[in-house]
Image (spheres, grey):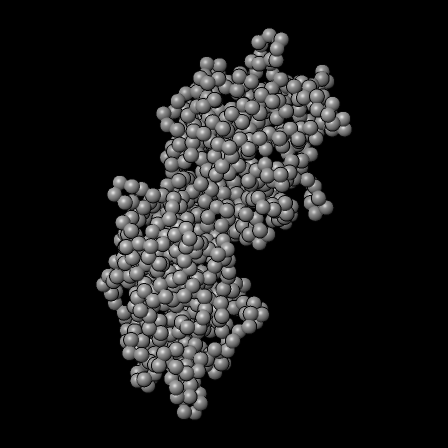
């Protein structure tokens, strides 16, 4: 403990079972003491409660206080105690506190046992504290700690000091996985941005080992201890957290710059003094700086704007973007930093969950011609709200929102008239979307409609485009020896009184009216070959992070007895005589989904392949309400795709009027989809049209509680109309997250 701070430690051990079952804090009057991270004698708690009635002590914002550590400060019979306190804000009767989310103030209290055996106390920041500090025996506190405590209430900003980087020189840290983001300790250090560094401790690969070193010399003047688990503490203006607790960190301990402080906890854990979500055996550090300065590491300078996720490392003319590599701490192991604006060692949880936002063509191009500024605005808002994946609609009805390619430019890019199909808008929306998203640390997945090939009621697409629209390239085809004439056999068919007929472009007055879109048939081989070629072209030419398939299904139960599908089914019967036509449709669609997955991975293995799927897979005993099924009504076997590894993720579309207004129905379908997640991912769909962000928060919380890998919000336009961006950033997405 050290000669100047010895004696009995007032720690009553809190067994793990007791800690786990400790009741949550209850709502209280301002300045009330609640259960902390250790049990304390009731007479000392009463004295501190009395001291907290002086509102000059602690933080005016704090509504509750908790004891986080306590020690005896002399050898004279335990008559003086020094107590670490945390002031808490935002704690209600329904929530348990933690230092990162609720910490509004960190400081100390002094307690003295009087001659009559009663205890009196004073809280740091009050006049009574200074009076009590003056009465502490001279040899009970080190001179450095006494000076630190006497100046704490009015301490001025110190000049820049040299601070040691907290990992071993010559090793490297992986940087930028979470980007640059605000700190979670505003009461300790204000106005700085955190920069993420991670390591797996693989020293054989040159990675930093799990050993933390002191940034500067100083004295410990605050401690938060989850007894026997982890300890967080402050030295001067540097706050360290998530060190494994070996009982060797205590108020008054003198720390030398470069001194080994211990190891950080790894993996996932949650305690009052801090929590973390990260892969097993990984640990996580922060460096940070205020907006007015730049951070320099090994010749690299961190450059960022006030939009804190828009940042890059620069070294002369070289650039590095977030997540591109490991940054070495070699000869340059000392940086000039400004106290009260820098937090070197804060292990921010490396939370991993998919936070997905659909940006459809209607979201950013509701009134043609399409607006580039609107597209960029929505992506920036998604980043501000801390989404991490954007699904950007790249293909809608056999058209392109990117430079062709195999299909013509969408007419919506230039007008509201289909006759402008194929007209170059003078810019490339997909390229701009990728550039904007990547600059903000977002993944960009190209979202493509699969079988919706033209719009209802728009007559035929123009014939003079280059390339031709698939309405024509699919139609002017007949197997030999038929003549080269137009045929509608690529479309879905439905039975009529005159036999199976193709879907018309007309919405009325036709044997098979157009239904939402003019659909191509998933059972026609050349339709699927064309769709596969479209996807491979996008993956080859663009730096997309994923391919997201929508409308990868039939348009309804009555489709499609088209002649080409029926011929293929007849051939399949020779091998499987008991095969039903419905099973053949599901099997055919499933095989093409697997082929798309396989061929995308052959081009770029890192590209994720996902699909939007019907809200109900199949009826089960728990699904008691009326609903259509993806499996039986649309021949979409989405759970099979996930189980057989034909997709990386599915996004069940559990939104719309019914599910937006009925949480129980949403929850029932969410359970059914997540039950088959296994090693793949389910992104549960949530509608932004829900009229209360609190109800959206409840769905996100439930998704997390059942182990879903993420959520997908439909869609950006409604998010913007309801102005939910700040609600997400301040609520369920408060902590940044990596895509899983």
In the rendered image, is residue 344 in sight?
Answer: no
Give the residue drawn at x 67%, y 35%: 631
Task: List x then y, in percent, for residue 628.
Answer: 67, 37
Write down the quadrant of residue 459 in the picture.
Answer: top right
Give the residue drawn at x 55%, y 29%: 450
Task: List x then y, in percent, for residue 314.
Answer: 29, 45
In the rendered image, is residue 708 in sight?
Answer: yes
Task: List x then y, in percent, for residue 740.
Answer: 50, 47
Left or right: 733 with respect to 501?
left
Q: Residue furthest front?
A: 204
Q: Nearer the viewer, residue 83 or 458?
A: 83
Q: Nearer the viewer, residue 104 or 456?
A: 104
Q: Quadrant of the N terminus?
A: bottom left
Q: Residue furthest right?
A: 578
Left or right: 281 with respect to 235?
right
Q: Relative to residue 700, is residue 718 depicted above or below?
A: above
Give the residue drawn at x 48%, y 46%: 739
Total number of numbered labels? 0
Q: Relative to residue 682, is residue 61 depicted above or below?
A: below
Task: List x then y, in percent, for residue 179.
Answer: 39, 49
Q: Relative to residue 396, is residue 320 depicted above or below?
A: below
Q: Residue furthest bottom?
A: 116
Q: Nearer the viewer, residue 121 or 332?
A: 332
Q: Nearer the viewer, residue 393 or 656?
A: 393
Write down the quadrant of residue 116 in the picture.
Answer: bottom left
Give the residue drawn at x 28%, y 55%: 331
């Amino acid at each position: 403990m050290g000669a100047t701070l010895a004696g009995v430690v007032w720690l009553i051990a809190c067994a793990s079972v007791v800690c786990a079952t400790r009741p949550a804090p209850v709502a209280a009057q301002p300045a009330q003491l609640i259960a902390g991270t250790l049990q304390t004698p009731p007479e000392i708690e009463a004295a501190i409660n009395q001291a907290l009635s002086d509102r000059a002590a602690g933080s005016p914002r704090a509504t509750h206080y908790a004891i986080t550590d306590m020690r005896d400060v002399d050898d004279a019979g335990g008559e003086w105690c020094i107590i670490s306190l945390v002031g808490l804000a935002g704690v209600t009767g329904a929530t348990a506190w933690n230092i990162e989310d609720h910490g509004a103030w960190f400081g100390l209290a002094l307690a003295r046992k009087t001659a009559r055996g009663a205890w009196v106390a004073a809280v740091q920041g009050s006049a009574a504290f200074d009076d009590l500090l003056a009465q502490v025996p001279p040899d009970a506190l080190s001179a450095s700690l006494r000076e630190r405590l006497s100046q704490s209430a009015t301490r001025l900003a110190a000049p820049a000091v040299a601070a040691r980087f907290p990992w071993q020189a010559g090793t490297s840290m992986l940087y930028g996985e979470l980007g640059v983001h605000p700190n979670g300790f505003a009461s300790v250090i204000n106005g700085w941005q955190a920069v993420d560094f991670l390591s797996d401790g693989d020293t054989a690969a040159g990675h930093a080992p799990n050993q933390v070193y002191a940034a500067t010399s100083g004295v410990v003047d605050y401690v938060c201890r989850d007894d026997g688990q982890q300890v967080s503490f402050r030295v001067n203006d540097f706050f360290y957290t998530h060190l494994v607790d070996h009982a060797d960190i205590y108020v008054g301990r003198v720390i030398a710059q470069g001194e080994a402080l211990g190891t950080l906890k790894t993996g996932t854990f949650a305690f009052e003094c801090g929590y973390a979500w990260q892969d097993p055996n990984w640990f996580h550090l922060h460096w940070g700086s205020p907006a007015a300065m730049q951070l320099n590491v090994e010749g690299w300078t961190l450059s960022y704007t006030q939009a804190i996720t828009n940042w890059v490392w620069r070294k002369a003319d070289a650039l590095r973007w977030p997540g591109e590599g490991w940054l070495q701490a070699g000869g340059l192991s000392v940086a000039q930093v400004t106290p009260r604006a820098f937090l070197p060692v804060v292990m921010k949880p490396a939370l991993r969950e998919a936070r997905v936002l659909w940006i459809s063509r209607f979201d950013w191009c509701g009134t043609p011609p399409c607006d580039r500024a609107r597209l960029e605005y929505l992506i920036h808002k998604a980043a501000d709200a801390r989404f991490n994946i954007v699904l950007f609609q790249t293909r809608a009805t056999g058209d392109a929102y990117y430079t062709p390619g195999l299909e013509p430019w969408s007419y919506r890019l230039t007008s509201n008239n289909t006759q402008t199909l194929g007209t170059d808008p003078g810019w490339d929306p997909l390229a701009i979307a990728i550039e904007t998203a990547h600059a903000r640390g977002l993944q960009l997945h190209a979202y493509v409609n699969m079988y919706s090939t033209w719009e209802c009621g728009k007559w035929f697409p123009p014939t003079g485009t280059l390339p031709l629209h698939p309405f024509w390239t699919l139609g002017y085809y007949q197997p030999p020896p038929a003549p080269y004439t137009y045929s509608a056999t690529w479309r879905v068919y439905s039975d009529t009184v005159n036999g199976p007929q193709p879907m018309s472009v007309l919405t009325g007055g036709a044997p098979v009216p157009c239904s939402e879109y003019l659909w191509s048939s998933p059972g026609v081989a050349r339709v699927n070959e064309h769709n596969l070629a479209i996807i491979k072209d996008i993956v080859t030419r663009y730096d997309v992070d994923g391919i997201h398939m929508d409308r990868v299904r039939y348009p309804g139960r009555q489709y499609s007895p088209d002649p080409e599908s029926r011929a293929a089914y007849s051939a399949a019967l020779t091998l499987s005589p008991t095969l039903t036509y419905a099973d053949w449709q599901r099997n055919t669609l499933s095989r093409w989904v697997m082929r798309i997955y396989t061929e995308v991975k052959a081009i770029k293995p890192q590209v994720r392949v996902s699909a939007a799927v019907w809200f109900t897979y199949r009826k089960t005993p728990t699904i008691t309400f009326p609903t259509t099924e993806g499996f039986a009504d649309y021949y979409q076997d989405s759970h099979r795709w996930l189980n057989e590894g034909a997709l990386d993720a599915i996004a069940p579309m559990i939104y719309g009027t019914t599910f937006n207004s009925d949480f129980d129905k949403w929850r029932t379908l969410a359970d059914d989809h997540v039950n088959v997640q296994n090693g793949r991912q389910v992104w549960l769909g949530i509608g932004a049209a829900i009229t209360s962000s609190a109800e959206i928060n409840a769905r996100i919380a439930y998704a997390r509680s059942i182990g879903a890998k993420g959520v997908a919000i439909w869609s950006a336009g409604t998010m913007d109309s309801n102005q939910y961006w700040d609600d997400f950033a301040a609520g369920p997405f408060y902590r940044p997250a990596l895509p899983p």
